[in-house]
Image (cartoon, grey):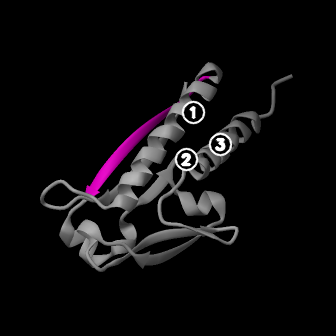
Amino acid sequence: MKTIQITWQRLVDDQGRTCDRCRGTEQELHKALRFLVRSLAPMGIAFSLETRALDVQEFTRDPSQSNRVWIDGRPLEKWLGAQVGASPCGGPCGDADCRTLMLEGVIYETIPAELIIRAALQAVEREVKRLTATPLSR
């Protein structure tokens, strides 16, 4: 069974809190995973989720690293052809400009399940192409 790794990192402050934007993305990630597992497990494709916590010092050095998602080792924005932007966040993020994604003219502060699913399906497609590229022996 092929396992596609989804990795997500976000700021977690000293009290274990994160911002509303990251909390929303976490909910969307779980929604996407439920859909992907239910849909693709019968085809032998599994998914795993790794979450990473950025501490305040890491976040302060580069706020754009928070609320970041990779699928099968590749950034979500690369799978989708999205652009990374930033906007004020609040909560534990303070007055930092935090990561956003822009795709097809829409700016996303919270990453919706739909985008995660679209990127994951592209990773699955890449894997299928890799597996079927091997010529059959005659």
- Is the residue under label 2 in contact with that under label 1 (CB below 8 Å)? yes
Percent x, y of residue 97: 38, 78
Percent x, y of residue 117: 60, 44
Q: Which stretch did the figure color magenta? A: 44-53
Q: Is residue 80 left or right of residue 73?
A: right
**Closer to us: 130 or 8:** 8
The label on residue 93 is none
**Closer to us: 68 or 88:** 88
Percent x, y of residue 82: 62, 67
Q: Quadrant of residue 36?
A: top right
Residue 49 lies in magenta, yes or no? yes
Q: Label 2, on which residue?
A: 113
Label 2 – label 3 distance at C-alpha: 12 Å
- The amino acid type found where label 3 is placed reads Leu
Q: Label 3, on which residue?
A: 121
Label 3 – label 1 distance at C-alpha: 11 Å
Between marks 2 and 3 in the image, the one whose residue lies nearer the viewer: 2
Q: Residue at the location (58% across, 23% down)?
A: 41
Q: Where 37 falls versus 72 (above or below)?
A: above
Magenta span: chief secondary structure: strand
Q: Indicate the secondary structure of the residue bearing disc 3.
A: helix
Between marks 3 and 1 in the image, the one whose residue lies nearer the viewer: 1
- The amino acid type found where label 1 is placed reads Phe
Q: Where 66 falls versus 53 (above or below)?
A: below
Q: Label 1, on which residue?
A: 35
Q: Quadrant of residue 37?
A: top right
All told, the count of numbered labels is 3
